[in-house]
Image: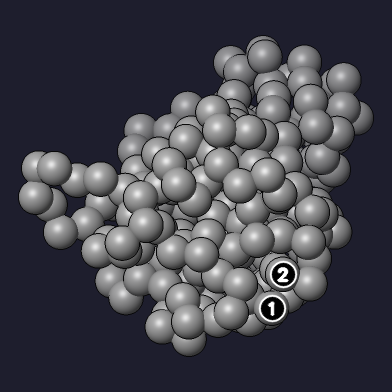
Amino acid sequence: MITSSRNNRVAAAKKLRRTRVRRQMGNTLVEGPFLLEEAAAAAAQIHEVFALEEDAATARICKEQGCSLLRVTPQVMGALASSVNPRGPVAVVSIPETPPLEPRDSVVLWDIADPGNAGTIIRTAGAFGFQVIATAGCVDLWSPKVIRSGVGGHFRAPPIVDLDPDPGVLIASGLTPLVAAAGASAPADEVVGIPVPVALIIGNEAHGVPGRVVDTPGVNVFSLPMPGGAESLNAAVAAGIAMYLRMNAR
C-alpha cells in the first residue's frame, strides 16, 4: 500500500500532467474505470495502475492485461487524479503511434485550444466514423483532460496530431477541405454532400480558421443556418452538426 504522494512512482506519474513530459516519455494518464476498460479493449500498453484497496474490478483488468497494480490510499489517489473526489483508478498508458493520414472523411481541429472542445470533437468523430486530425497549434490531445472529455474515443480511433498547418497537405492526401464559417454564403447542404472524402476544418474558438486557409484554392467554405441570430456556435457543437450533416449526405 502506497501511503505517500512523495513515493517515486506516484511522483513520476504526476509529472505526466505536463505536455513536455508526456511527449518525452510517450505516456499519458488515464483516469476512471470506463477509460481504463476502453484502453484495455483497444490493446493499449498499460504500464501500471494505481487503485484503491477495495477496487476489485481494476484488479481483474490488471490481471488480464498483465500490468502492475499499485494499491494507494484515498489521499494518494486524490494527489494523482484530476477529478473531484476521485475513486480511481489512474493508469499510466502508452500514447498510441500517430496513424497515417487516410483519404476518408475527417474532422480537422485547427488550433483548437479548449480541452473540453477537443475531447468532445474526438468523441463525436468516433461516434460518426470520422478520422481526427489536429494541427500542431492545438491543445495536446493526449492530455488527461482531453482524454476524459473524449470518453474513450482516443483509443477507438487515435487522432493524427501535429498536422502541417497547410491545407495543401490535406488536398495532396485526397481530401477536400471544408470550412465552417459564420457568414459564409454557401449553405451547408450544398457543400457537405460532395462525393469525395472531405476534411471538415473547425477553427480556433477565438480566432476561427485563418484567412490564408480559407482563401487557399480548393478549400470550400459553408455556413450553418442560425435563424436565432447568434453570432457563432461553440466549436464542438459546430463540429458535431457538420459531421452529422456529412454522415447523412454520404
Name the residue rendered at 68%, 44% in the picture: 195
Neighbours of disc 2 within 10 Å: few (<14), some (14-19), many (20+)? some
Name the residue rendered at 34%, 38% in the picture: 84
Residue type marked 2: Ile
**Near-viewer residue (190 or 241):** 190
- The image's mark for residue 171 is 2
Name the spot of residue 49 as percent of width and height, x first. 71, 37
Indicate the quadrant where residue 103 lies.
bottom right
Mark 1 falls on what kind of element?
helix
Neighbours of disc 1 within 10 Å: few (<14), some (14-19), many (20+)? some
Q: Up-down: is 172 above or below 197? A: below
Q: Quadrant of the C terminus?
A: top right
Q: Up-down: is 152 above or below 41? A: below
Separation of disc 1 and disc 2 at Cα? 5 Å
Q: Are marks 1 and 2 in contact (CB under 8 Å)?
A: yes
Q: Quadrant of the N terminus?
A: top right
**Near-viewer residue (187 or 177):** 187
Name the spot of residue 40 as percent of width and height, x first. 78, 29
Name the residue rendered at 49%, 50% in the picture: 191
Any part of residue 210 in sight: yes
Image side of residue 166 versus residue 234, left or right: right
- The image's mark for residue 168 is 1
Name the spot of residue 189 as percent of width and height, x first. 43, 42
User: Residue extending furthest bottom?
Assistant: 212
Q: Up-down: is 115 above or below 113? A: above
Residue type marked 1: Gly
Any part of residue 2 in sight: no
